[in-house]
Amino acid sequence: MTIGDHLHAFHGLPAFTFPGPEAKAELPAPDSVAWRITSDTYDADEKWVTAFARFLDAVDTTGVRALVVGAWEEAYEDGPSAVVEALVAARDRLPALRALFLGDMVMEECEISWINQTDVTPLLTAFPALEELGVRGGTELRFPAVRHDALRRLTMEAGGLPADVVRGVGASDLPALEHLDLWLGTPDYGGDSEASDLEPILSGARLPRLRHLALRNSEMQDAVAAAVASAPVVARLETLDLSMGVLTDEGAAALLGGQPLTHLKKLDLHHHYIGEPLLERLRRTLEPAGVELDLDRGDAEEDQDGDGTVWRYVAVGE
């Protein structure tokens, strides 16, 4: 699976792409959409920071609630440091901003594993009222430990999420965070974390309001499932998402042998490599308790070499 569509909505608002310099389109009300500001990764006619400057002049930004950063020029080589600097510099002009997504690019613009990122925590420092932060791309991504009292939703999409980023999230104090979504990925694309790196997250000590946890798109999904099976944070969750990764019978058995999951509203395991006997056990254990299950195997297909080696893949890699 690859990412073929831009965000259609963000933070409960329809996404609207701010038009180019020659366009004459009528602009919507500032607070009615998530504004997507974009350039081009190849042969850009206008730099992202220039498009953003036009946006600041054309829109009453005091009412803007959500921003989506699309492509910046040469994102496959350069991170968005200039983008982050421009956003931070404009913080006083965006007093209503509550949601920000950095890197809304599709495969034709830049494959997810090619997207270069940067330290995104200055955005949290600059916008203390921010409630939602999304980031796509793991290369050069940094997230040193931070405290933020308003953030409710944090999403990091990557073909490989660096271990330092996982540890940084775990070491952060995010007392309002309700939804955490990490695409851990594979070592081939920089996903070098281990299940032990998740322990601060799974303890829940710094995440007292966490109700929705997604640790997905992981090559080590069985080890993640085993860690989750005994994790203190699980007892307070409403939804648990271990989808998009290489989850096999081993991981499913660990979940079934761990703490009860019957309190969950939903367990999402789609894109998996679990055999039918374990799938049936999951259904018999959880569906009578009212747990919604997503057990769709999707396009999780196995390849086998002539020597008997079986290859399994995450949903989103390159």
Image (cartoon, rainbow, N blue to C red):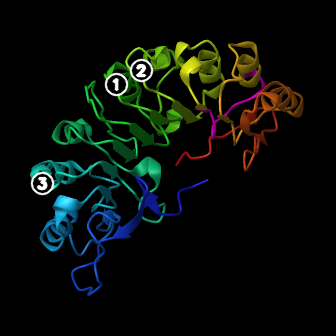
Give yes or no for residue 246 being in the magenta stretch: yes
Q: Is residue 234 above or below residue 104?
A: above
Closest to the observer: 295 or 98? 98
The residue pinned by badge 1 equals 175
Q: Is residue 89 visible?
A: yes
Q: Are marks 2 and 1 in contact (CB under 8 Å)?
A: yes
Q: Is residue 7 visible?
A: no
Q: Are marks 3 and 2 in contact (CB under 8 Å)?
A: no
Q: What is the three-letter code of the residue carrying label 2?
A: Pro
Q: Is residue 287 above or below residue 258?
A: below
- Name which of mark 2 and mark 1 comes first in the sequence: 1
- Residue 140 picture quarter: top left
Q: Residues within 10 Å of mark 2 (few under 14, many from 20)?
A: some
Q: Which circle marks residue 244 in the picture?
A: none
Assign a secondary structure to mark 2.
loop
Q: Give the dominant element type of the magenta stretch: helix, strand or loop.
A: loop
Assign a secondary structure to mark 3.
loop
Q: Residues within 10 Å of mark 3 (few under 14, many from 20)?
A: some
Inter-mark Cα distance, 2 to 1: 6 Å
Q: Position of residue 102 (x, y in %)?
A: 33, 51
Q: Which circle marks residue 90 in the picture?
A: 3
Which residue is rendered at x = 26% and y = 40% of the image? 120
Closest to the observer: 295 or 59? 59
Q: What is the three-letter code of the residue carrying label 1?
A: Pro
Inter-mark Cα distance, 1 to 3: 26 Å
- Name which of mark 3 and mark 2 comes first in the sequence: 3
Q: Position of residue 302 (x, y in %)?
A: 76, 42
Q: Residues within 10 Å of mark 1 (few under 14, many from 20)?
A: some
Q: Is residue 73 above or below residue 147?
A: below
Inter-mark Cα distance, 3 to 2: 32 Å
Total marks shown come to 3
Q: Which circle marks residue 208 in the picture?
A: 2
